[in-house]
């Protein structure tokens, strides 16, 4: 890649609008995780409704008195955070950094699309239904079950990475300054809880591949609901839900201290 392209990407990433927008995006992620955790807590104790995933959280946000305005802010934040990740992708030297930035860019832009659809009055779509549909599409391809198993293994790997990142507080490397004791503690527990939830999602993909049944694949909502089927399921889901809330708290600290 030419040096001029790298310089252009660096200039774009350093633009005040993109940098500020990226911080808004991290704050939007905080709001999202607070809502997911809240929905999961209600689920744990049999109250309320909603889907404990990103789509459900955005739909719940849209149902608040100021939801329409907040959804547009969230959309803008995720778009700019996705664009910032693209500038990081272009400027990265190592392949693993490029893959990580690409994955994050896609994730944030997809979230922006979901928020935009809800803000415009559309449906949030069912996260688990979309997951099963995607799994069915993959299985229809040559070596489809292998592809689904690989997806599951990758998601499990990402979950384990989150757990390790939380346990070792390696998330502090993403920040330009130490955010303080309480944000650090929230980050530790939040990353571990989110990692456990992601690993569960990955396990369901592997099970779907083994059983050749796309319906076995579950998104975040389905994975969290599966915790209720375990002994002391309500207690376990409460712990995970509170951890997701803490990840949201950490995300607000990241919005302030992130290296952007």
Image (tube, grey):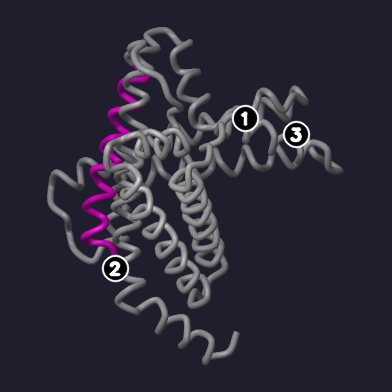
**Which numbered disc, 3 or 1, marks the residue that appears first in the sequence?**
1
**Which numbered disc, 3 or 2, marks the residue that appears first in the sequence?**
2
The residue depicted at 54 percent of the width and 86 percent of the height is: 5
Q: Residue furthest bottom?
A: 4
Q: Residue under circle 3?
A: 136
**Which numbered disc, 2 or 1, marks the residue that appears first in the sequence?**
2
Q: How many marks?
A: 3
Q: Residues within 10 Å of mark 2 (few under 14, many from 20)?
A: some
Find residue 110 and report its horizontal and vertical position in percent. 53, 52
Q: Is residue 83 above or below residue 147?
A: below
Find residue 125 and report its horizontal and vertical position in percent. 56, 35
| Magenta stretch in the rendered image | 236-258
Q: Which one is nearer the viewer's eye here, 110 or 187?
A: 110
Q: Which one is nearer the viewer's eye here, 220 or 46?
A: 46
Q: Quadrant of residue 42?
A: top left
Q: Quadrant of the N terminus?
A: bottom right
Q: Residue under circle 2?
A: 20
Q: CA distance from mark 2 to mark 1?
A: 34 Å
Q: Secondary structure at mark 1?
A: helix
* Numbered mark located on residue 129 in the image: 1
Q: Residue furthest right?
A: 142
């Amino acid at each position: 890649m030419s040096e001029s392209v790298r310089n252009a990407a660096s200039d774009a990433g350093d633009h005040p609008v993109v940098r500020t927008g990226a911080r808004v995006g991290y704050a939007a992620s905080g709001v999202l995780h607070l809502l997911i955790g809240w929905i999961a807590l209600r689920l744990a104790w049999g109250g309320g409704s909603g889907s404990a995933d990103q789509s459900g959280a955005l739909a719940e946000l849209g149902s608040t008195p100021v939801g329409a305005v907040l959804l547009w802010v969230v959309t803008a934040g995720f778009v700019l955070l996705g664009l910032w990740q693209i500038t990081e992708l272009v400027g990265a030297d190592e392949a693993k950094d490029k893959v990580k930035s690409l994955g994050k860019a896609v994730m944030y832009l997809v979230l922006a699309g979901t928020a935009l659809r809800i803000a415009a009055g559309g449906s949030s779509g069912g996260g688990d239904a979309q997951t099963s549909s995607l799994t069915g599409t993959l299985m229809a391809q040559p070596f489809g079950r292998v592809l689904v198993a690989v997806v599951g293994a990758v998601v499990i790997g990402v979950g384990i990475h989150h757990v390790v990142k939380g346990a070792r507080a390696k998330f502090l490397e993403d920040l330009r300054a130490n955010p303080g004791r309480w944000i650090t503690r929230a980050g530790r527990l939040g990353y571990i809880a989110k990692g456990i939830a992601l690993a569960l999602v990955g396990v369901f993909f592997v099970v779907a591949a083994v059983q050749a049944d796309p319906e076995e694949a579950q998104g975040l909502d389905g994975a969290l609901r599966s915790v209720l089927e375990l002994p002391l399921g309500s207690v376990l889901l409460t712990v995970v839900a509170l951890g997701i809330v803490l990840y949201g708290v950490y995300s607000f600290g990241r919005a302030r201290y992130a290296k952007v």
